[in-house]
Structures are given as C-alpha cells and as structure tokens.
Amino acid sequence: MGAIYILWLRELKRYIRSRVQVVVSLAQPCLYLFAFGAGFSPVFRQAGLGSYLQFIAPGIIGMTILFSSVFNGIAMLWDRQFGFLKETLVAPVSRLQIMTGRTLGGATVAMIQGTLVLVICLIFGFRPQSWLSLPFAFVFVFLVAMLFSALGTAIGSVIKDMQGFQLVMNFLVMPIYFLSGALYPLANLGKVMKVITHLDPLTYGVDGLRGALIGHWQFSVALDAGILAAITCGFLVLGAYLFSKIEV
Amino acid sequence: MIRVRNLVRTFGDFTAVKDITFDVEQGEIFAFLGPNGAGKSTTIKMLTTLLRPTSGTIELDGKDPNRNQIAARQSFGIVFQDPSLDQEQTAWENMELHGVLYHVPRKVRAERIETLLKTFELWDRKDAMVKTFSGGMKRRLEIARGFLHTPKILFLDEPTLGLDPQSRNQLWTHVKALNESEKTTVFLTTHYMDEADRVAHRIAIMDHGSIVAQGTSAELKAQTNTESLEAAFLALTGSSLRDEGADAKAGLRQMAQMWRR
C-alpha cells in the first residue's frame, strides 16, 4: 500500500509544482469553449438545439480529462529517459502496485483538471440543470479519468521516443476526441459515423457527463457507466500486462 | 553472499555471457573489470533481476533472483550506470520514496535518511530539487539512496563515470566507510584501474563474455608479471579496441535511414 501511495503522491506533487503547465493546459479548453462556443452558437440555435455552450461544456470537460490522463501516462517516457522508471522497477514491490500508483495518480490529476475546467465553464456562463447534479457528474469524471489513465499507462509502457508520442496524439487521442460527440449531437448521424462514434469510449463518457449535467442523454446512465467501467477494467488489465513486460 | 554458477546469457546467436562462475564473500568489495562489451552490464542485469539468465544459477544471500524476485530485490541496492533519480523532486523526497518502496519503517527511515545525507554531505541541500544538483551531487545522492534500506549487497555500475577526481575520491571514501561499518558487500564495475586497485578486495576480469582471471590485485599482477593493475588488465585482455554493440535505438535509426534511401 505504501508503494501505491508514494507513487500516487509523486504524480500529484509533479502536477502541483508545474504551475506553468497547469495554466497552459487550461488555455486549450478555454479556447475551445470560446471559439466553438461562441462561433457555432448561432447555427446551433437556428437548428433549434438551444445553447451551444450548454451543449459543449460537458464535452470540453471530457476532452480535458482525456488529454490530461493520456499525457500523464505518456509522461512515463520522461521517467524512462531520465532513468527514474528503473529505480521503481527494481524495487521490492510488484509491478502491479507501481502501475496502480502511477495510474491512480494520473487519474487524480485528470480529475483535478476536469474540475478546474468545470469551474471555467461556470464562469463562461454554463449552468448545470441543478447543483445537485454536480456530484452525479463526478461519477463520470472519475470513470473517464480512470479509463484513459489506464490507457495512458498501457501506451506509456510501449512507446520509447518522441515520434511515438506524436503518433499517439495524432492517430489516437485526437480521433477519440473528435469522434466522441463532444462537439456535436450524435442523433441522426450517417451509418459509418454512427458505428465509429459508438466504438469510441469517450462517447459514453461525454454522454454521461452531458446527461448528468444538463439532462441530455443519448444513451442511459446504466449503459454509459456500465460500458465505461467494463472498458476501464479491460484497459487496466492491458496496462498491467504491458507494464509488467517493460524491460530496462 | 553472491554465488554464481555457470551463468550463460545469449541474445539470438550472440553469447554475451559465457559460462561464468564466481563467489563474493560477505563484507567484501568485489570489482568487475573488463573492456566495453565484455558482458559486465549483462551480468549485473542478471544479478539484479532485470534480465533472465539463459542458463546457470545465481544466489544472492541465499535467494534466487529469478524465482524469488521481491525477496532478492529487498536484499540489494543498486546504483545504475546512468542516473535514475527523480529530477522533479527534492533530495529528501527521493530518499523518502526509496525508503517507502523498500519497506523501511517510518521512524528508521527518517533517521537513516538524515544520517546518510549528512555522510554524503547533502544534508543542507535536502530540500533542493535534484535537477539543480551537479553531477557529483547526483551520484552521491544515488549512492546514499542505495544504502538507505541497509542492503546486504550494493551494486555499483560504473558509479564514478564522468566525475572529477575530488568527487571520485570522496565517493570511494564514503563507500569504504559504509562497507566497514555496515558490512555491506559491494559489487562494482569501473574503467578506472586505480580505483579498483585501491578499493576492491578482490577483482575479476571479464573479456568476451568470460572471466579471464580473478584474485586480489597483487595476485593479478603476479600472474601477469606486471607492475600495475592497468598493465595486468591490458596483458589479460589485449590492447585492441572494442566497439560496444549498438543499442536497439541506434539499430532502428540505421534502419530508418536505409529505408529513406
């Protein structure tokens, strides 16, 4: 338990100490909120779908958690390069504990980021259906953070250089974001898009967040939470397996 | 303390370690010398559970590092050839993290961290981020960290690489002092013959994956009829240059260049 705690704490310390990075990472969601929120608002309203800001705020929160979680996993690249990874891998604790500590740390950081963005959304004028829905939304914040932190650990265990990082960003993280329904409603999409969006795990995360926060459900609580939990378990197993295979 | 019998490790059709056998007694400082690519690092990796042997047996304090990984790891400390500190944490935090990972009880941990940081003259910088440390300070911190959980064996893989003579000298003084006071067995590799000569009780010389000679410095000199350990080393391993096998990354880079053409 000590090992999990100290590695979790390490992730948290690193996050709190990199203030510049915190500000920079919050700038992107702000830009999305402002540029898309304001830019698409008239079209969205004309289509009779209400306020676009209300619609994308949960999507932007989901995006923030996705980016933050995966980044944290990929940060393993630095630990590999600076050698710290080795120090943990020869320690007399199981790799599963090390992997758990890192993943929980990454998920915690992502949850903090998500919360900060939620506060920013509120400042921009976003209003949840009721304040009581905030704790409900946190169930999904947690699930999304765990899911993508586990994926981040799995990816971080495999990639070994910066090219790999670019590959992951362009061919995995960005598509997950754009094909998740974070930016547009999933109703009435073409067949191909429908299949693709339904395969994207973030779709269920964003739907859960949106449902909890503004009462707009594409699926249902049970389906979203169930699918997210199942995929999280799958990714945790995958992450644990790939992490156990790391050679130094 | 360390018992190695007929250890072999092959990579594909290349044999990095060819059937080596040696013993290190408790409290001994044992130096492993050899030209680049002789198989020293491969041997250390096998001794420290990072690599599985192709065949042969290893015992560390009676434990088999392959079958009983966690127990074996608890009994040794290691300072790697390249740094393994967390640059974004303070010296004290690095020590604390190590102490927790190695199950050192809280109270003992605080005391030992203080003693070791003082011994290695880092106490007044304990709250500074490691990234602000000089190369010598980082090395000292790593060695202090290696001693933290009172390991029975401490592996030092070229610990003085790139340090100035002052730092090297000081570092060995501390290691020798701790070897005497805590009876820690020390297994080291180095390219500096004078260090091995001065610090090590016994020396093994490795070349092309085999141990070509072992004994005290005096025995090695007598065996080769030479005046210094360096001369003995050259007499045993020849004076031709060795090119270390390129690592996987270099191989990939080469491949990428070929494909582009």
Image (spheres, coloured by chain):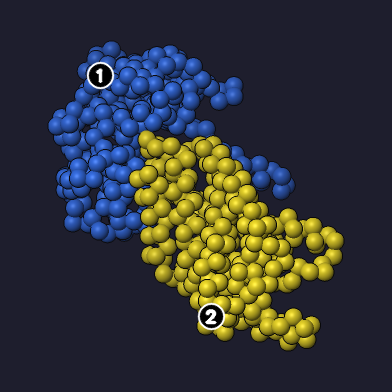
Chain colours: A yellow, B blue
Q: Nearer the viewer, residue A111 or A99?
A: A111
**Mark-to-mark CA distance, 2 and 1:** 68 Å
SS at circle 2:
helix
Residue A238: numbered disc: none
Structural crowding at the residue carrying mark 1, measured as other residues with C-alpha within 10 Å and reported as few (<14), some (14–19) or many (≥20): some
Residue placed furthest toward the right: A191
Quarter placement of the N terminus of chain A: top left
Q: Is residue A231 left or right of residue B59?
A: right
Residue A126 location, x and y as percent? 58, 81
Query: Residue under mark 1: which chain is it in?
Result: B
Direction from residue A172 to residue A161 in the image, left or right:
left
The amino acid sitting under disc 1 is Glu
Q: Could you tell me if the residues under marks 2 and 1 are in contact, i.e. CB atoms within 8 Å?
A: no
Indicate the chain on which mark 2 is placed. Answer: A
Residue A137 drawn above or below residue B187: below
Q: Nearer the viewer, residue A163 or B192?
A: A163
* In front of the other: B156 or A75: A75
Q: Report which quarter residue A173 is drawn in.
A: bottom right
> Residue tagged by mark 2?
A122
Q: What residue type is disc 2 on? A: Leu
At 55% from the left and 66% from the top, the residue drawn is: A136
Residue A14 locus on image (x, y percent)? 40, 60
Q: x%, y% of residue A205?
A: 63, 62
Residue A166: image location, x then y, percent: 62, 57
Residue at 49% over, 17% down: B55
Nearest-to-viewer mark from 2 and 1 = 2
The residue labelled by disc 1 is B25
Query: For numbered disc 1, what is the local secondary structure?
Result: loop
Please tell me if label 2 and label 1 are on a single chain.
no
* Quadrant of res B139: top left
A24 with respect to B127 (left or right): right
